[in-house]
Amino acid sequence: MRDSSNRLIDYLRISVTDRCNLRCTYCMPPEGVEKKRHDQLLSLEDLALAARAAASLGVRKIRLTGGEPLVRHGIVHLVSLIAAIPAITSLGMTTNGTLLAPLAADLKAAGLMSINISLDTLDPERYRELTRGGDIRQAIAGVEAAAALGFPLKLNMVVFPQTTPDEIASMRGFADSLGARLQRIAAYTLVDEKQDEHGMERPPRCATCNRIRLTSDGMLRPCLRSSLEVRFDPKHPEKSIREAVLAKPPCGGLCDDRTIAQIGG
C-alpha cells in the first residue's frame, strides 16, 4: 500500500528483541536496555501474524532485526513461519554475527534468504572498543559460516568521521573475498538533524523510504527518526498496519524516546 506521500510501502522490519549480547557505542548504552517481561513482548505467533497481515497489504520484503535477533528464543521457528508466507519474496536478517556460526545452517533450512552482518572494523582492538568487549573472532566465524552456506551476504559498516579510507578499502577487500557486498552506513544518532546527503548506501533518503518497523513490544513505528507509533493489535492486524503506514511522515525528524537498538535500526 501507499502512504500519505504516495510512497509504496513494501518493506517491514521486525525487531524481535531489543536485547543484545554486545554494547556497541553508537547503538546501545553500556548497561544495555531494561529487560522486558515475557508478557510485554509479542509472541512468535503474533510476529508471524503481523508478517502475514503486512503481506496481505503489499509488503514483499521482511527483515528480522534486534537488538540482536539471535538472542531471541525460537528465532529459527519464527523464520520458518514467515518463510511460509507465499507473498514474501525477500526474508533477511541483520545480526552482529557473533552467535551466527552454530545457527546458520538451521536458519538456511528454515527459509532465511539473506543475511546482513554488522562489522565496522577488521581490527580486533578497535572492534573490542566499539562493541565494549566483543570478540571479533566470533563475528568473523559468523561471516564465514554464512558465506560457506551461500547466503547472499552484506557487511554493514558504520562509517565514523574518524574512519579512514584505508579501513573502508580493507573492509571492501574482505567482503569481495567472500562474495559479499559492503554497505557503508553513515554514523548518525536519532536526536540529530536528519541528513539525506551523506554519500553512502545508508540511511535511505526520506523521499524513497519504503519501510515501517515493528518493535518487539508491539509498537509499529512508521519512521525510524520519529516518535510516532501505533500499537499493533493482533485482533485487527491489517488495520494496525494500515494506520501506521498512513501515519508515516514525509520526512524524518527526531526520535528521543527509544534507542536505535529498541527500534531495530
Image: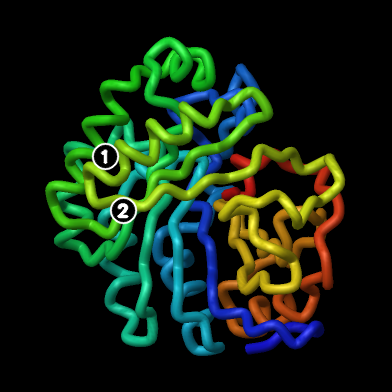
Q: For the residues marked 1 and 2, what is the alpha-carbon distance in whole angstroms?
A: 8 Å
Specify the amino acid type for callout 2: Leu
Which disc, if any, is residue 153?
2
Specify the amino acid type for callout 1: Val
Q: Dots 1 and 2: beta carbons under 8 Å? A: yes
* Quarter assignment of residue 128: top left
89 relative position to 104: left or right: right
173 relative position to 213: left or right: left
Report the front residue among 253 and 198: 198
Horizontal and vertical percent for residue 3?
74, 83
Horizontal and vertical percent for residue 150?
16, 56
For the point 73% across and 62% down, which residue is it? Answer: 223
209 relative position to 42: left or right: right
For the point 45% across and 73% down, which residue is it? Answer: 61
Secondary structure of the residue carrying tag 2 is strand
Horizontal and vertical percent for residue 79?
31, 62
* Quarter assignment of residue 258: top right
Secondary structure of the residue carrying tag 1 is helix
Which disc, if any, is residue 143?
1
Horizontal and vertical percent for residue 227?
81, 54
How many residues crowd around disc 2 within 10 Å: few (fewer than 14), some, or many (20 or more)?
Answer: many
